C-alpha cells in the first residue's frame, strides 16, 4: 500500500516572506469558525509557517509574495531533532512541495 504525507494550507500571508539559506519561510493565517452547544459563534486564526526549500521556488516566493496575499500550498510534515546545550530539541516543519499565489480579489473580513 502506498502512503501519503500531505498537508494543505490555504490562507493569507501575515508578513513578508523571510529568506534563509536559499530557502523561504512564509507565515500563513488560516481561519476557522464553529458554533458551540449554546449556539454561540466562535472564530479563531491559526498560523502556519510554511518552508519552501527549492531554491528557485524560494526566490520566486521572496520576489512575488507579500503580506496579505492569498496562497495555497501542498506540503509534507517533517519531524526532526537537534542538540542544544546537551538537550534534544524536537521540531516539526511544514515543507512546501507546491506553492501558489492565489488571485482571489480583495479579502472580505466580514464574510461568514
Image (cartoon, rainbow, N blue to C red):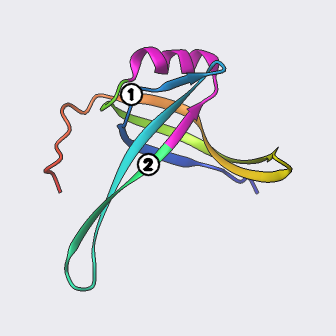
Count of labels shown?
2
Numbered range of the magenta stretch: 49-65
Nearest the eye: 9 or 50: 50
Q: Which mark is residue 101?
A: 1
Q: Position of residue 26 (x, y in %)?
A: 48, 33
Q: Identify the residue position indicated by label 2 in the image.
A: 47
* Residue in the image at 45% along x and 38% along y: 27
* Residue in the image at 54% along x and 15% along y: 59
Give the crowd class for mark 2: few <14, some 14-19, many >=20 residues within 10 Å.
Answer: some
Q: Identify the element where label 1 is drawn.
A: strand
Extreme residue in the front direction: 85
Q: Which mark is residue 62?
A: none
Q: Position of residue 36 (x, y in %)?
A: 28, 79
Q: Position of residue 7 (x, y in %)?
A: 55, 49
Question: Which image quadrant is residue 10 in?
Answer: top left
Q: CA distance from mark 1 to mark 2?
A: 17 Å
Assess whether residue 44 is covered by the magenta stretch: no
Give the crowd class for mark 1: few <14, some 14-19, many >=20 residues within 10 Å.
Answer: some
* Residue in the image at 71% along x and 54% along y: 3
Assess whether residue 63 is covered by the magenta stretch: yes
Q: Quadrant of the N terminus?
A: bottom right
Amino acid at each position: 500500500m502506498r502512503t501519503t504525507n500531505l498537508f494543505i494550507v490555504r490562507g493569507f500571508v501575515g508578513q513578508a516572506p523571510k529568506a534563509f539559506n536559499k530557502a523561504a519561510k512564509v507565515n500563513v493565517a488560516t481561519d476557522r469558525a464553529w458554533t458551540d452547544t449554546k449556539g454561540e459563534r466562535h472564530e479563531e486564526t491559526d498560523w502556519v509557517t510554511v518552508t519552501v526549500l527549492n531554491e528557485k521556488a524560494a526566490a520566486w516566493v521572496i520576489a512575488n509574495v507579500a503580506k496579505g496575499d492569498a496562497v495555497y500550498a501542498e506540503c509534507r510534515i517533517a519531524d526532526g531533532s537537534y542538540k542544544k546545550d546537551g538537550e534534544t530539541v524536537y521540531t516539526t516543519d511544514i515543507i512546501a512541495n507546491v506553492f501558489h499565489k492565489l488571485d482571489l480579489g480583495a479579502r472580505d473580513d466580514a464574510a461568514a
